[in-house]
């Protein structure tokens, strides 16, 4: 069962400049940052709030590390802006299979490693009214300590 908006992914050309905008304009601070080589992105997670299910909601700022990454290709076509929305779930495996059973294409056969040790998968935007949708199961708290 989907429990919350985990994050909204925003593609950007310059991560440091974009982080500074969100810090100076809204007071959001970087909670976590990392490079995901598999996905070809450098990212920063800005925590917005805690949620009632013990998780949190974030803005995820994404800068491609290579032009041929999914985010790099998306930026070349669309420019900066909202890239995807992610919903939190306690069971990314079960929920992705249930959604697949309803005719929605799940982009990964098995969930992959995401930010902060999470497990993720994506749903095809053509099956989700034009919105690239991510499902996220957060890592246990001990794995996300920074």
Image (cartoon, rainbow, N blue to C red):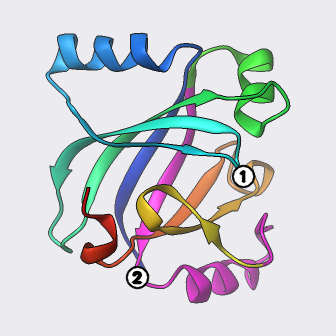
Quadrant of the drawing holding the C terminus: bottom left
- Would residue 114 be found to the left or right of residue 110 on screen? left
Please tell me whether mark 2 or mark 1 is closer to you in this view. 1
Give the residue drawn at x 54%, y 66%.
Answer: 135
Count of all numbered marks drawn on residues in the image: 2
Q: Is residue 91 magenta?
A: yes
As rendered, which of 46 and 84 lies closer to the eye?
46
The residue indicated by pointer 1 is 38
- Would residue 117 be found to the left or right of residue 11 on screen? left
- Would residue 53 be found to the left or right of residue 134 on screen? left
Q: Which residues are magenta?
A: 82-109
**Residue 68 location in percent, x, y?**
85, 31
Give the residue drawn at x 49%, y 67%.
Answer: 136
Disc 2 to disc 1: CB gap under 8 Å: no
Residue 78 vertical position relative to residue 142 in the rendered view, above or below? above
As rendered, which of 73 and 30 lies closer to the eye?
30
**Residue 71 location in percent, x, y?**
70, 33
| Residue 90 numbered mark, or none | 2
**Residue 52 location in percent, x, y?**
14, 69
Query: Callout 1: helix, strand or loop?
Result: loop
Residue 134 vertical position relative to residue 68 in the rendered view, above or below? below
Quadrant in the picture for residue 78: top right
Q: Earlier in the sequence, mark 2 or mark 1?
A: 1
Q: Is residue 88 magenta?
A: yes
Give the residue drawn at x 41%, y 59%.
Answer: 116
Give the residue drawn at x 73%, y 49%.
Answer: 125
């Amino acid at each position: 069962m989907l429990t919350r908006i985990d994050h909204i992914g925003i593609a950007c050309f310059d991560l440091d400049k974009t982080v500074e905008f969100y810090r100076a304009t809204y007071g959001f601070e970087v909670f976590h940052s990392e490079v995901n080589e598999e996905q070809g992105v450098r990212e920063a997670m800005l925590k917005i709030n805690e949620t009632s299910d013990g998780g949190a909601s974030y803005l995820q700022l994404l800068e491609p590390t290579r032009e041929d990454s999914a985010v790099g290709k998306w930026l070349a076509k669309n420019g900066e802006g909202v890239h995807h929305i992610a919903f939190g779930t306690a069971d990314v495996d079960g929920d992705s299979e249930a959604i697949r059973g309803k005719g929605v294409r799940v982009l990964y056969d098995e969930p992959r490693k995401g930010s902060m040790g999470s497990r993720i998968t994506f749903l095809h935007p053509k099956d989700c009214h034009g919105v690239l949708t991510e499902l996220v199961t957060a890592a246990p708290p001990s794995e996300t300590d920074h």
